[in-house]
Image (spheres, rainbow, N blue to C red):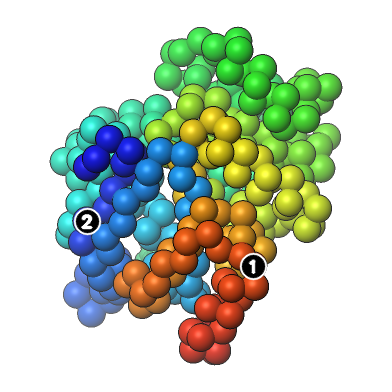
Amino acid sequence: MNERTVAEVEQLGKVHGEGGAAVVALAGVTAAFGRGEFTAVMGPSGSGKSTFMHCLAGLDRPTTGRVRLGGADLGSLDDEKLTRVRREQIGFVFQSFNLLPTLSAWENILLPLSLSGRKPEPDWTDRVIAATGLAARLGHRPAQLSGGQQQRVACARALITRPALAVADEPTGNLDSRSGAQILGLLRRSAREWGQTVLMVTHDPIAAGYADRVLFLADGRLVDEMPQPTAGRVLDRMRRFEPQEVR
Ligand code: ADP
Ligand code: MG
């Protein structure tokens, strides 16, 4: 692992289930993620994108191969240590926002810090809040915010700990294109300006066009990689997958 590398998978394999019900979700994927790099993961439905993200983020354990994050080999950690890595080193953004409905936006954003007994760093917190454009709405509950605003709160929550890796699974999947563009702009800015390493799963070529590179998965394998993607080139590449498999 060189010093720019924040996270790395080596020959990552994952089988879901056992015996006759076993499904090979990942069949030996090797990739590295550098500091400040914004990577999109694409591929047909069932190609292993979510499994890949879950293994990298310590939500799922590899069946074979290795996942390294920061200094840690995630496969060798017991559940308690893995939970701590997840809490302290990973920021999560989900398609469905996943904010706690009884907490204000502000409390949601600070939750990862509260859970690990850390105090907010004022300068950093101000910067993250300013980037979301939600300073005037921090007292609102999620139900009082639009979907785009809720997802901006979720992004702030993911970034507030300055995690080694921020992961986003279809972060714009429930948003209109304008709100989606704000989220993608925020993720790109976190990578470019703040050195945040970001991994995003998406099926949207426009979303992937915001990333620094795209990894393409098919049948649990890494089949292609595109640096400096544009929406148009990503769309062309996606069309070369089996048409019935593209979601
Ligand atoms: P994608 O996110 O690209 O759609 P997934 O990683 O969700 O792909 O799934 C990859 C393969 O693993 C699929 O065949 C899927 O049905 C299977 N799979 C995913 N999660 C589970 C699970 N918890 N139990 C059994 N099979 C699963
Ligand atoms: Mg998925």
Residue at image location 61% in from the left, 65% down from the top: 230
Q: Eyeballing the image, is 123 above or below 200?
A: above
First in sequence, mark 1 or 2: give its number. 2
Q: Where 140 falls versus 12 (above or below)?
A: above
Residue beneath label 2, please? 10
Can residue 107 be seen at all in this image of the molecule?
no
| Spot occupied by residue 169 in the image (x, y as percentages of width and height) | 53, 54
Vertical relation: 206 (above or below) 156: below
> What's the residue type where badge 1 is placed?
Ala
Count of numbered marks: 2
Q: Could you tell me which residue is drawn at 56 percent across and 84 percent down? A: 239
Is 11 situated left or right of 208 in this image? left
The residue under label 1 is 231
Residue 244, position as x, y percentages in the image: 54, 89
Which label lies toward us, 1 or 2? 1
Going 55% across and 63% down the picture, which residue do you hit? 229
Q: Quadrant of the image for the C terminus?
A: bottom right
Q: Residues within 10 Å of mark 1 (few under 14, many from 20)?
A: some
Figure quadrant of residue 172: bottom right
Instruction: For mark 1, give the secondary structure.
Output: helix
The quarter in which the N terminus is drawn is top left
**x, y percentage for residue 110?**
58, 21
Q: Which amino acid, mark 2? A: Glu
Disc 1 versus disc 2: distance between alpha carbons? 28 Å
Going by the image, does 144 lie left or right of 90?
Answer: right
Q: Is residue 172 left or right of residue 157?
A: right
Depth check: give the residue in front, 21 or 81: 81
The answer to whether mark 1 and mark 2 are in CB contact below 8 A is no
Q: Residue at point 53% right, 39% down?
A: 191
